């Protein structure tokens, strides 16, 4: 379903997941992926360096996008997230070293 960011796949949406503590992980997902699927994937593939913050269930993970909690059934495509950066945005993101959208996990 998803893959940890190593190379940008322009058929997927690149999400930058940020824990409340500030730890960051970039993962690519197909546009049809729901918020619940993102939480399940993150929970089932929890990075070892995040072990001290691991929760007991994926249902305890919540995604926040643009200041709003995402309902589990909302798909990434419904949020109109870009599959690839547009030309105006790509220069800014290239300077930051990232071509993705950000979601916080809490």
Image (cartoon, grey):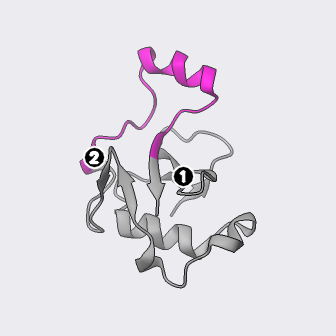
83 with respect to 56 (left or right):
left
At horizontal 53% and vertical 19% (from top left) the residue drawn is 92
- For the point 61% across and 75% down, the residue is 54
For mark 2, does the 10 Å Cα neighbourhood hold few (<14), some (14 to 19), or many (20 or more) residues?
Answer: few
In front: label 2 or label 1: 1
How far apart are the two marked residues, 2 and 1, measured between alpha carbons? 18 Å
The residue segment tinted magenta is: 78-102
Indicate whether residue 7 is drawn in magenta.
Answer: no
Residue 81 horizontal side relative to residue 20, left or right: left
Dot 1 alpha-carbon crowd within 10 angstroms: few under 14, some 14 to 19, many 20 or more: some
Report the residue at 54% width, 52% height from top. 18
**Residue sticking out furthest to the right:** 49
Q: Earlier in the sequence, mark 2 or mark 1?
A: 1
The one nearer the camera, 8 or 62, is 62
The disc at residue 79 is 2
- Residue sitting at x 54%, y 85%: 56
2 and 1 marks in contact (CB < 8 Å): no
Q: Mark 1 points at which residue?
A: 18
């Amino acid at each position: 379903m998803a893959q940890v960011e190593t190379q940008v796949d322009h058929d997927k949406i690149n999400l930058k997941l940020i824990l409340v503590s500030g730890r960051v992980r970039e993962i690519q997902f197909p546009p049809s992926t729901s918020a619940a699927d993102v939480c399940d994937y993150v929970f089932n593939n929890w990075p070892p360096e995040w072990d001290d913050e691991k929760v007991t269930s994926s249902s305890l993970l919540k995604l926040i996008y643009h200041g709003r909690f995402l309902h589990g059934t909302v798909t990434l495509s419904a949020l109109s997230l870009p599959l690839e950066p547009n030309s105006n945005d790509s220069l800014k993101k290239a300077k930051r070293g990232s071509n993705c959208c950000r979601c916080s996990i809490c």
